Amino acid sequence: MPPALLTTSLVNTIQIGSLYALMALGITLTFSVMKLPNFAHAEYVTVGAFAALIVSLSGNVNPLVIMLAAFIVGALVALVSHIAVFKPLEGREVSFYTLILSSFAVGLILRYILFMVADYFNLFDTRIRISLQILLREGYLILTNIFFWVVPSSILLVIALTLLLNRTPLGREMRALANNPGLARVIGIPVERVKNYSWLLVGGLAGVAGALWGLQTAVSPLMGWVAIISVFAAAILGGLSSFAGTILGAYVVAFSENTVMLFLNFNFGLDLAYKPAIPFIIIIAVLLIRPQGFTELIKRAGDLKR
Amino acid sequence: MINIDIGATAVAILTLFGIYSLMAISLNLEYGVAGVPNFGQALFVSIGAYTAGVTYTRILPLLAGVESVHPCGPTMGQALQLRSEVMAAQPVAGFINLALTFLIAAVLAGAVGFAVSYVTLRLKEEWFLALVLLVGGETVRIVVRGADDLICSHNGISGVAQPFYFLGDPRSSSLMFMILCVTLALIAYVYSQRLTHSPFGRMLKGLRENEDVTRGLGKGISLARAQIMLIGSAIAAVGGVLFALNTGFVNTNDYVVTLTLDIWVMVVLGGIGNNRGALLGAALIAILDRFTQVGAIALNMSGSPIEFNYVRFIAFGLILLLMLRYRPGGLLPESPLTTNAHDVARSMLQPRDERS
């Protein structure tokens, strides 16, 4: 594989891996604190992307404003789905499959509402409008300002989230809830309020991820849904409980989808059509062989269930 | 305005009802009765459809005694024409081919279902099985779509004619096909009713309620789970063959997670654990499906900017949420199973003075 191609794929790995990390942390957080494998997470991402797109179409808007709009809309949609759907189910001790099905249903509804919105305002295959500058062009490799929006923003957000979980009272309460909900309630943690904040946080981060995702590719009602399996693969690599593991998992998934895939394509002629199968294979392999993922490798750093 | 042909609509709805019933009965046996969370139903349905795609292009010409043409690439059109000619002129070859398709599809899907149940033994948490099945189905879909020769990758196989195509008149041939679908669905229903009420069915329900107790009673639970997955998957594959014949083509795009969700909607709507509920759910979804199609065409013709098809998915999501929240047992909830032994025991437990 020529070095230029390798560099390009590594740049992609970093960019996409950072976005996967941002989305997968939300999945890990929902699973740990709310005990819910939330497939509707995909649609919080898409909702955020559409919010960003609509704001950006109004003219020359600062990307920070766009990201803020995506955060707010994503957060509100997540909170509404919690209050309208998941919270009423929580009280009834329903089976896990009821929760999975409900999250699928929420995702389905949001996805097709977005289809209607996109259809009505004629927003199919539109990019979020920000000024594009090419910073470096060398052979295959083209670096634009988008890379320098996407990567530092996601890394900063991941760091901020980690600090929030480890250093603030809210973070401590969230971790307590993740560890032992009954005990958390007994010692007087305002469980409902912490859950509401967690949902806002999860939805907001997903929304920002959507906005950043929409900077690099066209916004579509299916974009979150298409990415969700890769994101779940990352979260599963993190054992669905470890923050550091999830971040590592996100880069591993992005690396396999970009660099490893390109390597296999170049050296063994494997068709690029098989690329979507990579996260699937990762999920199946991890669940069968090593369901704890990376958690034991990095027990110390940033584990929610310390 | 569009004119709705009531006869043809009824036939179309009943055909869908038959096909959906097979899928719903299969999921109901697996999840409703035995508690195996099959979130990969689309995989087992698709095995049936892919099998039809392969038999119609490879075995049918052999049976008809004509030289087969490679179905993909430049000879695609020629192969399609050959299939149509054979199906129109040689009904016997068509029927033998269909029987072989059912057989191969059921055996293949059953084997996959059986194998999957061994995966469950290795999983740390039970819900991982749901995820593995969901993801496994998608993986198979991507691999089949990537394979150039099997069903011509993303082009799929068209002209998979239903077996009564030779009748010529579309009204009578679709009527006959409807009867075939409904008959197969009813056979599956009677079979699953008998299965549910047999000692094996009671053991599966015990397994669903409490694995440890069932194991403690000396029942081999892994074999039981493997058996029900085998039976359920085979039924789903038969449904998949009919599904492909009904639409007339086999394409990997039809067998996505949304299809799995459709089948779950049927079972949740009708009643989890009740075979009659599966039939009811299938019937309601078949009607809803047909009416959203008609509505979509009507809305499109009236010049509306919004696609009515989106409403279908939103409606499905709402049905799922409302049922799970307000009527988790479904429209026809499962009734407790009683046996003769149960009645005898109850009469013995009654107070003495009441009996005398």
Image (cartoon, grey):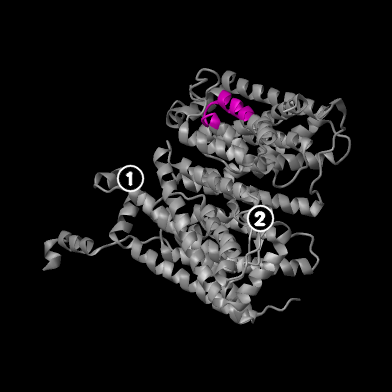
Q: Position of residue B99 (x, y in %)?
A: 49, 68
Q: Amino acid at mark 2?
A: Cys
Judge from the rendering whether residue B217 lies leftward or rightward of residue B6; answer left or right.
left
Upstream in sequence: badge 1 or badge 2: 2
Image mark for residue B302: none
Instruction: Tell me which residue sits at (53%, 68%) in the image.
Output: B97
What is the number of callouts on the image? 2
Calculate the distance from the C-alpha at mark 1 to the C-alpha at mark 2.
44 Å
Mark in front: 1 vs 2: 2
- The residue beneath circle 1 is B211
In-front residue for pair A263/B349: A263
Tell me where residue B112 appears, x and y as whole percent.
46, 51
Above or below B303: residue B210: above
**Toward which corner of the image does residue B353 lie, by quadrant?**
bottom left
Where residue B76 sits, quadrant-wise, is bottom right
Q: Amino acid at mark 1?
A: Glu
Does A64 appear in magenta? no
Give the quarter of the figure containing the N terminus of chain B: bottom right
Q: Secondary structure at mark 1?
A: helix
Prevailing secondary structure class for the magenta stretch in the rendered image: helix
Of A112 and A141, the residue lying toward us: A141
Disc sitting over residue B152 in the figure? 2
Q: Which residues are magenta?
A: A237-252
For residue B128, side relative to residue B314 (left or right): left
Q: Please tell me whether residue A17 is drawn above or below residue B343 in the rendered image.
A: above
Which residue is depicted at the point 48% across and 29% down?
Answer: A292
Q: Residues within 10 Å of mark 2 (few under 14, many from 20)?
A: many
Which of B195/B202 is in front?
A: B195
Does residue A238 show up magenta in the picture?
yes
In the rendered image, the quadrant that contains the C terminus of chain B is bottom left
Is residue A186 visible in this depiction of the protein?
yes
